[in-house]
Amino acid sequence: MRSIRAAAAGAVTLSLTLAATACGGGSPTGGGSNDSPKTLTYWASNQGAGIEVDKKVLQPELDKFEQRTGIKVQLEVVPWSDLLNRILTATTSGQGPDVLNIGNTWSASLQATGALLPWDAKNFDKIGGKDRFVDSALGSTGAQGQDPAAVPLYSMAYALYYNKKMFADAGIAEPPATWDELVADGKKLSKDGKWGLGAEGSNPSENVHHAFVFAEQHGADFFTPDGKPDFTGDGTVAAVKQYVDLMAKDKVIAPGNAEYAQNQSVSDFAKGRTAMLLWQSASANLTSQGMSEDDYGIAPVPVQSGTPGPGKQVNSMVAGINLAVFKNTDNLDGATTFVKFMTSDTEQKILNKAYGSIPPVKSAQSDAAFTTPANAVLKDTLAKSAAALPQVADESQFETAVGTAVKELFADAAAGRAVTTGSVKAALEKAQQQMPAA
C-alpha cells in the first residue's frame, strides 16, 4: 500500500465483521445499475508530494476520459490518514464513490466486506483480460482462491536509497547488501549531526512493512498457514527487535525519527540530513523535493546474508495501489470503462511516470522510462524477491496492531528505555490480543 505511505491503517475504527453484509459505494439507491451514465465519483489516494500535485497529474487524464466517453469524473484525492476509515464508513453506509484507489495490502480485508465488485473472468475481459497484469501485482488483489477484489494500478517496491556524496566522504565504496553492512556503514555515517538511516517510527504502515520483510528473512510469518495470528514466534520477535535495534542498539537512526509519520524521513534524506532511506519507489518524491537523481543511488534492500532472491531472501513487500469499484455503483458500465482507461498502456505509462512507480501492466513496462537503472532495481525486486502481505480478512487489523506495537517500541528506544527480547514479545502479544476473535 503507498504507496501505502502513511498511517492509514491506524485509522481503523469500524468492524469488518459488521461490515460483511454491507453493499457499499454509489448512492443509497445503487445496485449496479446505470442510473447515472454520464457521471462517476472517484476517490484517488494521495500518491504525490501533496494533494494539489495529484490533482495536477490526474485531472488532465480525467478530462481526456470525459472527452472520449462523455462521462464526467468527479475527483477527490483522499489523504492516506483518512482513506481506509472513509472506505470502511462507505461500506457500512452504502454511500461512497463509484471507483476508488485502495492500498493493495487492504484487498482481502475490503473483499471480506462484500462491498467491492469481484473481478471475475467476465469483468476482466471488459478491460482486456487478466493476463495483461504481472503475477506479483495480482497476488495482492484479494484472498487466494477468490476472484480479485480490485485491479492493479501502480506497483511499487522498497529499495535502499543512498547519498553518493555522503558515502564517498565516509570512504564507503558500495551500498550495503546485508544488514550487518548497513549497520557498519550507518555507524560511519552517523556523525556531525547527521544520521546513517531514516525511518518513520510513528507510522504503523511503514513499521509493519519492514517488520514483515524482516520476519520473512528470519523464515517466519505473522500468520499460520490457516490464517490465524501468530505474532510471538521466535522469528517474528527477532525480526521486530532487529528493526527497532537500528535505533535502540545500533544508533544509526535518530531518536527523533520515532515521531516521524508523514514522509519526514524522505525530506531529511532529500536535504542531506540522513545518508540512507528505505522507501517505496521514492524517486519522484525526492525529485519534487529538489534532489537531483545524480545525487543518490538505489540498491536492493539488504538481506540477512547473500543476495535477495526466492525464499528467505525476500527484501520487500509487494507494494502498490489497486483500483476498485463499489458493487452498488449507479454506473457499472461507466466504472468498468474507467478502469479499462486507467489500466490502458497509454495511461499506465503516463501515471506511473508521474508517480515514479512501475506499471503492473506487462506491455507498459517496456517504455524507456521504466528501464532506468533505478527502475530496474524495483522491477527486479518485484519479479524475484518481493512477497505479498498476508491476504487474510483481518489484514488491516494486523497492520494496525503490529504497526502500532513497533511504534511504541520505537518510542521506548527514543526515550532510552531498554528494548529487549522480552519487551518485544510482550508488545507483540498485546498486538495479537487486539486481533478479532475467530
Image (tube, helix red, strand yellow):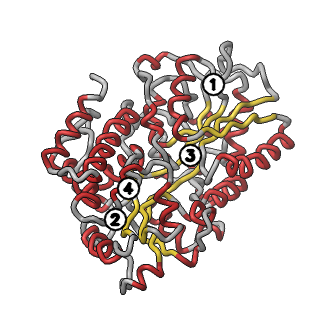
Please identify the quarter of the rendering in which residue 307 is found: bottom left
Please identify the quarter of the rendering in which residue 306 is found: bottom left
Q: Earlier in the sequence, mark 4 or mark 2?
A: 4
Front one among 22 and 169: 169
Q: Earlier in the sequence, mark 4 or mark 3?
A: 3
Q: Which mark is residue 55?
A: none
Picture quarter with the C terminus: top left
The amino acid type, in three-letter code, at marker 1 is Gly
Residue that mark 3 sits on: 152
Task: Tally the numbered discs.
Answer: 4
Considering the numbered disc 4 on the image, is that residue within a helix, a strand or a loop?
Answer: helix
Question: Can you name the residue that lies furthest to the left here?
Answer: 422
The amino acid type, in three-letter code, at marker 3 is Pro
- Taking the spot 19% from the left edge, 53% from the top edge, the residue there is 238
Q: Earlier in the sequence, mark 1 or mark 2?
A: 1
Considering the numbered disc 1 on the image, is that residue within a helix, a strand or a loop?
Answer: loop
Q: Which mark is residue 96?
A: 1
Residue that mark 2 sits on: 309
Position of residue 124 measured from the top left corner of the image (x, y, whole percent): 61, 39
The answer to whether residue 219 shows anywhere in this view is: no
The amino acid type, in three-letter code, at marker 4 is Gly
How much space separates mark 4 and mark 3, taking CA atoms?
35 Å
Badge 1 crowding class, 10 Å Cα cut-off, few under 14, some 14 to 19, many 20 or more, is many
Position of residue 225 measured from the top left corner of the image (x, y, whole percent): 25, 39
Comparing labels 1 and 2, the label whose residue is closer to the camera:
1
Residue that mark 4 sits on: 256
Position of residue 73 measured from the top left corner of the image (x, y, whole percent): 76, 36
Considering the numbered disc 3 on the image, is that residue within a helix, a strand or a loop?
Answer: strand
- Taking the spot 62% from the left edge, 23% from the top edge, the residue there is 25
